[in-house]
Image (cartoon, rainbow, N blue to C red):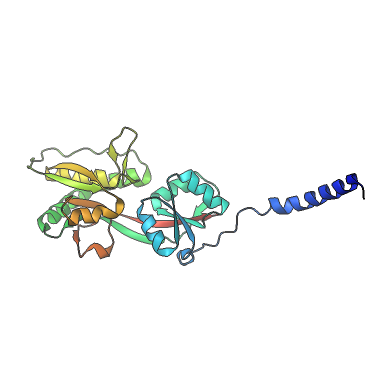
Amino acid sequence: MTMKRIAALFLIGALALAPAACSEGPPPNMVNSPEDIVGKNIGVFGGSPSARLADELGAALAFYSGSEMTLSLTMGTIDCVLMESSNAAQLVADNAGIRILSEPLLEYELRFAVAKENAELKNEINSALAALSSNGTLDGLRDRYFGGKPYIYVPPEGVTPHPGTLTLAISHDDRPFSYIDTNGNYAGLNIQVAIAVCDYLGVDLSIAEFETGELITAVWYGKADIALGWLPGDVLDRVNLSDPYADSSHVIIVRR
């Protein structure tokens, strides 16, 4: 057989295999309900509350960019993504190849954590939250950070200042709850709710940064007066919880 004949046969074979190779693409989606997430490769934002959940359910893979996480999902490197619902809505709106499952993995309330020995502070925070709910402040802040609406918080007038400062424990990389904005300032729903509560109480607010998993410990050990956010029931042996100021959920994103 001549070399030209061998080359021709090789080219024909390669062309015949090419469509099959190109049609493989990413694997089909295998996550259609929260039950299906168990044992899967789960993409999460590094340091987020979702990362803690993912560790308990499967193999958590941390990302620090939404575009990288989306690419890994669409290519099949990960099976699904777990994140807070408002962040998930924005990610899906920007990427046509992914969708959110209709059933959330977890629905939860956002509350203040206060040291157990400081029942008076918890009661004062609850009074402030009730007032901020009545005057529409909490609705406005939720619309701003969950819905992207242009709400501007205005501090109350006529509040009698009181001596003292409340120290808030935060993680600075947990959008939309607490983060550092483009001007280098602390921002987010939790930050703004804490500011509004302190304004209502007439006290100053200081902010101390901790890792996400250390927020409750910071309050427990007296390194901070308050922490905010999703606080599971198993923290009740260490801190007291306020009334809720918002609710949210962790949702699952999959390939279309």
Given residues 176 and 19, the one toward you in this image is 19
| Residue 187 shows in the view | yes
Indicate whether 38 appears above or below 51: below
Q: Residue at x 11, y 59 (%)?
A: 117
Name the quadrant containing residue 164. top left
Given residues 138 and 190, the one toward you in this image is 190
Name the quadrant containing residue 143. top left
Given residues 165 and 9, the one toward you in this image is 9
Residue closest to the far right = 1
Picture mark count: 0
Residue 230, percent from left and from top: 29, 56
Q: Is residue 87 left or right of residue 168?
A: right
Query: Where the C terminus falls, by quadrant?
Result: bottom right
Residue 238, percent from left and from top: 19, 62
Residue 123, percent from left and from top: 13, 56
Indicate whether 66 appears above or below 232: above
Q: Is residue 193 left or right of residue 23?
A: left
Q: Is residue 140 left or right of residue 50?
A: left
Residue 111, percent from left and from top: 24, 55
Residue closest to the far bottom = 35
Q: Is residue 27 left or right of residue 103?
A: right
| Residue 112 shows in the view | no
